Image: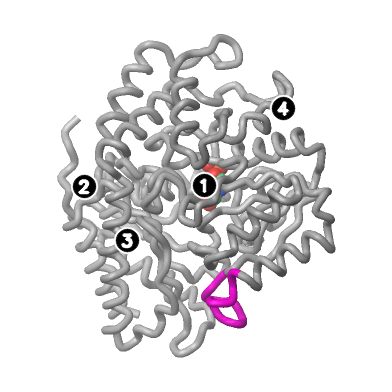
């Protein structure tokens, strides 16, 4: 495979004629419920570039939603997964096991926070990992209630829809939802009524009060939180919030689950985002970045909790597929060798610097209400000038303008007003800056 030139190139309209043709075929046969941010069909991808079927090269600020942190065709991922493909594609770990699965669990034990004894179980998708974390926590505590947070996202299966906060598009018309799921406030600094500086203490007190008064702490099996909330708008819970919730969980025998599916594996400039405030979760769910684009997810945690589910109680035909495990070992190798935590930190420095300049320089700079995030998980929250009223129209227009110029950006947020940037951690700094130039130009069009 020849390396893809790391340069933006727009040679047709976006989407181009071949993509338009494929999109027509797609609309005829692919269910309408499965959407696409940008119907540009991919020919190949790698580093910081997605090349489409018309020969356009897009700068990738999405990484397939925080997945291809090592790039979409990382050498070590391709090498290890290809070798595994040639050896065997599948046996089912529950039938005859293989070493790759065990090696991934060893790596997870080493990389996740805490020096206690740890075990893991592997699955296919993020939602499946979260569901299994709930099963394990319930088996361990012999309790049923699960606590989640405003703006949280945990997946699209029945239980994880219940855990997810936002109705459209994730839940509308898809109920009834699983019972025993309770939602409490999160410390969303930018929107906290008494100001960001009070959000950590006040939101944690409110959350704990609700859990105690409305559910009863000793009925709670698990508290599940994303250390940086992803789909909900790249919300970093204000300082003090996570430690207070983790301590409350500890004091009450509740399993504290960090959903690091989007924020994990170097994305925020450390192996896991919860490390920032020294949090050691009881269980941690991972997926996305773990395997360089191959479908793999995991639940990792305290050995005594992980072992609470009876033999045969956890699993699935494909969970921890050998090719996906080989991909994960290649991705982890790449993260270590290229110091992708360091790269993520540098991306934060460049992006936040440039975004702050844009905010200061632009006449409509005050539409950028907030610049936030960590590492290569950075976002701007867009508001109506001079207010904090969400401005989803601006987010949509900016995204559209960037797409037309060959820069793939994504939106998110409960109010649809957050433009988020998730470049592959291996992106070159020139490309990163060029992508930011395009974002800057896009502001002049709105
Ligand atoms: N937990 C924190 O971010 C997936 C979903 C995009 P799956 N986020 C992207 C969409 O519209 O479906 C996610 C996440 C967190 C769980 C999940 C679910 O992971 O691999 O998509 O099931």
> On the image, numbered disc 3 is attached to which residue?
348
> On the image, numbered disc 1 is attached to which residue?
260
- Across and down, in percent, residue 217 comes to 80, 53
Q: Residues within 10 Å of mark 3 (few under 14, many from 20)?
A: many
Q: CA distance from mark 3 to mark 2?
A: 30 Å
Residue under the point 56% across and 81% down: 195
At mark 1, the secondary structure is: loop
Disc 2 within 8 angstroms of ligand 1 (CB): no
As drawn, is 21 to the left or to the right of 218?
A: left
Mark 4 and mark 1 lie on one chain; the one further toward the N terminus is 1
Q: CA distance from mark 2 to mark 4?
A: 51 Å
- Any magenta on residue 196? yes
Q: CA distance from mark 1 to mark 2?
A: 35 Å
As drawn, is 269 to the left or to the right of 320?
A: left
- Across and down, in percent, residue 70 comes to 31, 41
Mark 3 and mark 2 lie on one chain; the one further toward the N terminus is 2
The part of the chain drawn in magenta is 188-200
> On the image, numbered disc 2 is attached to which residue?
55
Residue under the point 42% across and 43% down: 265
Q: Viewer-nearest of labels 1 and 2?
A: 1
Depth check: give the residue in front, 25 or 133. Answer: 133
Residue under the point 47% across and 80% down: 383
Q: Residues within 10 Å of mark 2 (few under 14, many from 20)?
A: some
Disc 1 within 8 angstroms of ligand 1 (CB): yes
At mark 4, the secondary structure is: loop
């Amino acid at each position: 495979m020849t390396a893809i030139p790391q340069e933006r190139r727009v040679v047709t309209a976006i989407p181009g004629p071949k993509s338009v043709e494929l999109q027509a075929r797609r609309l005829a046969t692919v269910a309408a419920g499965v959407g696409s941010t940008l119907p540009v069909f991919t020919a190949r991808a790698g580093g910081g570039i997605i090349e489409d079927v018309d020969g356009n090269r897009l700068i990738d600020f999405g990484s397939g939603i925080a997945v291809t942190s090592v790039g979409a065709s990382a050498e070590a991922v391709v090498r290890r997964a290809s070798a595994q493909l040639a050896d065997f594609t599948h046996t089912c770990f529950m039938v005859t096991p293989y070493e790759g699965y065990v090696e991934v669990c060893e790596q997870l034990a080493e990389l996740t926070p805490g020096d206690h004894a740890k075990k893991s179980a592997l699955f296919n998708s993020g939602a499946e990992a979260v569901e299994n974390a709930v099963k394990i926590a319930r088996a361990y505590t012999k309790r049923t209630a699960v606590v989640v947070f405003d703006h949280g996202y945990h997946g699209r299966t029945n239980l994880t829809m219940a855990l997810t906060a936002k109705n459209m598009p994730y839940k509308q018309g898809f109920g009834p939802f699983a019972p025993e799921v309770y939602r409490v406030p999160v410390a969303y600094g930018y929107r906290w009524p008494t100001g960001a500086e009070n959000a950590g203490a006040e939101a944690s007190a409110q959350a704990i009060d609700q859990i105690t008064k409305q559910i009863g702490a000793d009925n709670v099996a698990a508290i599940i939180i994303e250390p940086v909330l992803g789909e909900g708008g790249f919300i970093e819970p204000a300082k003090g919030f996570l430690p207070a919730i983790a301590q409350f969980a500890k004091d009450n025998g509740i399993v504290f689950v960090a959903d690091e599916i989007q924020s994990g594996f170097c994305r925020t400039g450390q192996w896991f985002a919860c490390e920032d405030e020294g949090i050691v979760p009881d269980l941690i769910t991972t997926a996305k970045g773990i395997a360089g684009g191959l479908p793999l997810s995991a639940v990792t945690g305290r050995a005594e909790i992980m072992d609470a589910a009876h033999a045969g109680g956890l699993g699935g035909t494909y969970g921890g597929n050998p090719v996906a495990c080989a991909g994960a070992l290649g991705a982890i190798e790449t993260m270590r060798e290229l110091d992708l935590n360091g790269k993520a930190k540098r991306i934060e420095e460049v992006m936040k610097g440039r975004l702050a300049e844009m905010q200061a320089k632009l006449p409509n700079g005050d539409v950028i209400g907030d610049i936030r995030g960590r590492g290569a998980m950075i976002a701007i929250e867009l508001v109506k000038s001079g207010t904090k009223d969400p401005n989803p129209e601006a987010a949509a227009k900016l995204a559209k303008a960037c797409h037309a110029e060959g820069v793939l950006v994504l939106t998110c947020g409960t109010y649809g007003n957050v433009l988020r940037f998730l470049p592959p951690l291996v992106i070159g700094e020139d490309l990163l800056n060029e992508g930011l130039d395009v974002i800057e130009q896009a502001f002049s069009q709105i």
